Image (cartoon, rainbow, N blue to C red):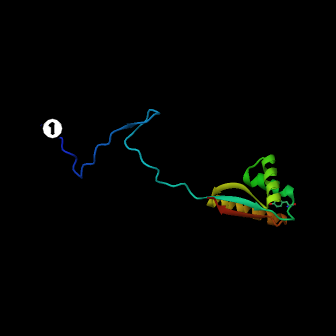
Amino acid sequence: MATNNPPTPSEPPVKQPIREEGGSVVLERRTQRVKPPQMYQVALLNDDYTPMEFVVVVIQEFFGKDLESATRIMLKIHLDGKGVCGVYTKDVAVTKVDQVLEAAHKSGHPLKCICEPVG
Ligand code: TYC
């Protein structure tokens, strides 16, 4: 005769399927266990010597902005002293800073580029 005893510790409880809206079926719902990585914003700083045109090209080349956005960011830096060009994971952000500083140095401009954690 079948008994209705609760499962013993060696016998994990049978998971009931959960039907999701899209039609898929899962046996258990897991809470998100991997937290998103710390992100870093890469910013350029203003100075009195780097030509505006050079900054616009840098923002286009290294941060993938079109001419209009690059010009807007450059003018913000010129007026406010600093402007964010992009937000990345740490490795990518550090690489962007290196690339910008190298390009500026090679061209003889004192352009400064920094990265800082967001949030
Ligand atoms: N202030 C510079 C000039 O007048 C232009 C400039 C803009 C320089 C942005 C740096 O990150 C910068 N030529």
Q: Residue at x 73, y 50 (%)?
A: 64
Q: Say which of 94 and 73 sits in front.
A: 73
Q: Which residue is mark 1?
A: 2
Q: Say which of 118 and 37 sits in front.
A: 118
Q: Splitting the image into 4 quarters, where does residue 86 fall? A: bottom right
Q: Residue furthest left?
A: 1
Left or right placement of residue 15 versus residue 61 in this view: left
Left or right placement of residue 5 versus residue 89 in this view: left
Name which residue type carries label 1: Ala
Q: Say which of 77 and 24 sits in front.
A: 77
Q: Residue at x 18, y 44 (%)?
A: 5
Q: Residue furthest front?
A: 80
**Residue 107, position in %: x, y?**
84, 63
Where is the C terminus found, in terms of image quarters? Answer: bottom right
Left or right placement of residue 17 versus residue 90 in this view: left
Q: Residue at x 51, y 55 (%)?
A: 35
